[in-house]
Image (cartoon, coloured by chain):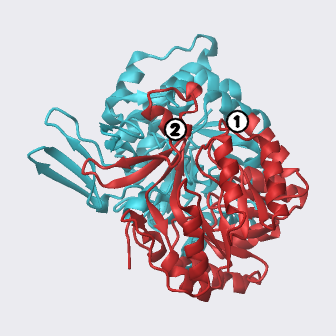
Amino acid sequence: MELVCPAGSLPALKAAVDNSADAVYIGFKDDTNARHFAGLNFNDKKATKALEYATDRGVKVFVAINTYPQPEGWIRWQKAVDLAADLGVNALICADISVLDYARNTYPTLNLHLSVQGSATNYESLRFYQQHFDIKRAVLPRVLSLKQVQQVAIKSPVDLEVFAFGSLCIMAEGRCHLSSYLTDQSPNTCGACSPASFVRWQETSEGLESRLNDILIDKFQPNEKAGYPTLCKGRFEVAGTVYNTIEEPTSLNTIALIPQLSAIGIKAVKIEGRQRSPAYVAQVVSAWRQALNSYKTDPNNFTVKPHWQNELAKISEGTQTTLGAYSRPWQ
Amino acid sequence: MKLSLGPILYFWPKQQVYDFYQNIIDTPIDIVYLGETVCSKRRELNTDDWLELAQQLANAGKEVVLSTLALISAESELNSLRRICCNNSIIIEANDMAAVQLLSAQGVPFVTGPAINIYNGRSLSLLHQQGLKRWVMPVELSAHTLQSILTECVEQGIKDKVETEVFSYGYLPLAYSARCFTARFRHLPKDNCQFVCINYPDGILVNSQEKQPLFTLNGIQTQSGSVYNLINQIPSMQKMGIDIVRLSPQSHDMKQIINQYHAAIQGETVSLIANDNQCNGYWFAEPGINSCL
């Protein structure tokens, strides 16, 4: 399985490449990509350097142009596709059908991948994208159980990539408007979920409050570790009880599933985290590289080494990890 | 401008569903969307029951559309979808690209619901080429964006070939998950959910720790915690050329709401339905939770 790694900056890309990623995915410095954060991502100069660094070392570069353009922004998405094609990237990762259509018609030899934001959770959807836009690969949303991933894989007309590690988005990606409901910005429209510019921390007599656009997302006691106010990981009140109504702050970690994912025929595993530091990228990529190599060398005797898990646990949200939707009881 | 009744998003007992539709027969609703769109485990009515109900409503003069599941993740769900898409008589609302694929492959015209991501006129035009005849825009888009999309439709030459419907009343469908939040609230695993959704005919309200209504839990769906209501935007929607206004069923007062919307469409000045907990921010390009005058 190919190891696909995130890079929000050139140092992060170098960290991924130096730790033996098979492919690195990046985005441009605007709302054309679903990780649109201030100070991150690539302009054309940095992207050129990224391409040089990666391709010189035999590592592929994918570009995510995976938000949904509204009419007035179309020219930005068109230019992003043009720039990626000029750079000679190995694939574009797209979600919107007009972007896919433009890329297919303008650059017929450019590989297209369906982004997780395309929200295709079954093989009939994949057929649509394959037949109309000749996509070569699709990234599956993090809502399928392992058995469901298998059902998709058996009849999928394209290669499949699944999430391996990182923040756990528990809604079907591409079909979640919770962020825009509270802030007016969402992954689909602006490439951001629970955007940092709306976050406010406030020390009060009752504890540390985290707010998103002035709405209270969580309240932490002095002995608690305060998490980023991602709205779906907040503590809310339902019928008099306060709890993590939607999900606890935790990270997805599927290292234990490497044999099953490989047996199903999954072609690539994706590490989440273009917003993370180069050190984070280096740590995750290194652990996953070791795990994949270990599996490749001796597939019948694969065991998860404690030091991989320890390394990964240290950098997980709330230092917790989960198999997420891959494991049915989680659902 | 026509009035439509969207699919029931909650899990109601079979008799309640029948009573609900019996009650709307003599209302000025033009189009009725039927079927389960949220969770495939909700089977108070099976496909045959829905088809029979569709026939009854059609006989009563309503245009009927069958709505399909929004998040299709299992083989069994694809099998049900195939059955619905091959019914040969009733038009289908696709809420997942799987339905778009099945319907376009058969060359059958279809409607797309708000869970299909159409954010621009180019995408709309591409889907029109595949058979789309009506669409409901994603709920997070604004009037301004909708106007730009309609302008693009003129440029694409499809303005008169595609009907535009706007989700205008009800709890907004905001997200879909693998996890059932209603079961989680009741400390039940999804695989043994005991169909507890049936106890919450309008979902479960989620408040912030400061008692601010935020969301509504409805099985695997998360909805807004406030009722979206665009009744005072009817005149501007009429000017924009919106064809259909969609009301999303709630367990109470639907007749009154239908009548108020009908009156507004006829040009009467209608005061807002008395309910503090309303929102309309999305329409004004603000956070959806906001309430703008």
Determine the image quadrant of residue A35. bottom left
| The furthest residue to the left | A205
Determine the image quadrant of residue A108. bottom right
Which residue is nearer to you in this view: A295 or B138?
B138
Q: Which residue is mark 2?
A: B199
The relative height of residue B151 versus residue A314 in the rendered view (above or below) is below
Alpha carbon distance from label 2 to label 1? 26 Å
Residue type highlighted by circle 2: Asn
Residue at 61 percent across and 82 percent down: it is B265
User: In the figure, is residue B30 to the left or right of A204?
Assistant: right
Which residue is nearer to you in this view: B154 or B137?
B137
Q: Can see residue B147?
A: no
Q: Can see residue B20?
A: yes
Residue type highlighted by circle 1: Ala
Label disc, if present, on residue B74 of the rendered structure: 1
Q: Chain of mark 1?
A: B
Pinpoint residue A298: horizontal percent, then vertical percent: 61, 14
User: In the figure, is residue B59 to the left or right of B26?
Assistant: right
Pinpoint residue B44: horizontal percent, then vertical percent: 69, 38
Residue at 60 percent across and 69 percent down: it is B258
Q: Nearer the viewer, mark 2 or mark 1?
A: 2
Label disc, if present, on residue A109 of the rendered structure: none
Local crowd size for mark 1, using a 10 Å CA cut-off: few (<14), some (14–19), many (≥20) = some
